[in-house]
Image: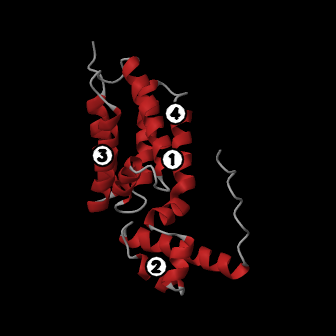
Amino acid sequence: MDAAPRPRRRMRADARRNYERLLAEARDAFAEHGADFSLEEIARRAGVANGTLYGHFPNRRALLEALMGDRMRALAATGAESLAAPPFDGLAAWARAAMAHAATYRGLGATMMEAVQDETSELHAACKAVLAAGDALVARARASGDVRPDVTAEDVYALVSASAWAGEQSSPAQADRLLAFGLAGFRSPPP
C-alpha cells in the first residue's frame, strides 16, 4: 500500500528568498544564454552556494519545471480550448502557442523532448499533457479533412521545434514565416 504523499514543509524566510533569487537568476540566464546555461553560474549570480541550488533543484529539469511548469500546463489547456475552434484554425493557433513556448529559452525544445521519454523527469507529466493536446488537435483536423491524411502529430511537433530553432538563429519573424509555410503544407488540397 502506498503511503500518502508527505506535505511539503513551509520554507524558512531565508530559504524562500534563496529559492526566489535562484528562479529569477535562472529565468534571466536562460533567456539570455539558453536552457543549458551553467547551473553553478546561476548559483553564483544568485549569491548562494551550489549546495543551496541543488537543495532546491536537484537537477536542471527540476529548475526548468519550477520555471516552466505553469506555462506548460497553460499550453496544454490552450490545446483543449483550441478544440472549440474550427479544426485547422485550432491546430494552427495551438502550433503558434507551442512555438512561442518552445522559443522561451534557446534549447528548451530539446529538453522537453528528452523529458517526454524520461518518466522520472520533473517535466514528464507536463510534456505529456502538451503532446496529448497536440495529438487531439491533429486527429481532429485529419478527421475533418482539413489536413492531409498523412499528417501526424510528430510532424507538427517537428515543425514547431524547427520554427522555434529558426527564430533562435535569425528572428521571430522568420520563425512565424516557417511555421505558416509548414502549416499551409499540411492542409488538404482543395477538391
Calculate the distance from the C-alpha at mark 4 to the C-alpha at mark 2.
37 Å
Given the image, on which type of amino acid does mark 2 rest? Ile
What is the crowding at mark 2: few (fewer than 14 residues within 10 Å), some, or many (at least 20)?
A: many
Q: Which of pointers 1 and 4 indicates the residue nearer the eye? A: 1
Residue appearing at x 52%, y 69% in the figure: 57
Residue 115 picture location, percent across and down = 41, 52
In front of the other: label 1 or label 2?
1
Residue 32 picture location, percent across and down: 40, 72
Q: Residue 82 has which mark?
A: 4
The crowding category of the residue bearing disc 1, from other C-alpha atoms within 10 Å (few below 14, some 14 to 19, many at least 20), is some
Name the N-terminal-most of marks 4 and 2. 2
| Drawn side of residue 30 relative to residue 3, left or right | left
Q: Single out the mark in the foreground, 3 or 4.
A: 4
User: Image point 57% across, 54% down: which residue?
Assistant: 70
Residue 31: percent from the left, percent from the top?
A: 43, 68
Q: Secondary structure at mark 2?
A: helix
Residue 94 left/right relative to 180: right
What is the C-alpha distance between the residues marked 1 and 4?
Answer: 20 Å
User: Considering only order in the chain, which callout, 4 or 3, is on the residue closer to the N terminus?
Assistant: 4
Q: CA distance from mark 1 to mark 2?
A: 26 Å
Q: Is residue 24 visible?
A: no
Of label 1 and label 2, which has the lower sequence position? 2
- Give the numbered dot on residue 42: 2
Using the image, tell me which numbered label, if any, was put on residue 177.
3
Q: Quadrant of the N terminus?
A: top right
Q: Position of residue 119 (x, y in %)?
A: 44, 49
Residue at x 51%, y 50% (from the top left corner): 72
Marks 3/2 in contact by CB < 8 Å: the verdict is: no
Disc 1 to disc 3, C-alpha distance: 31 Å
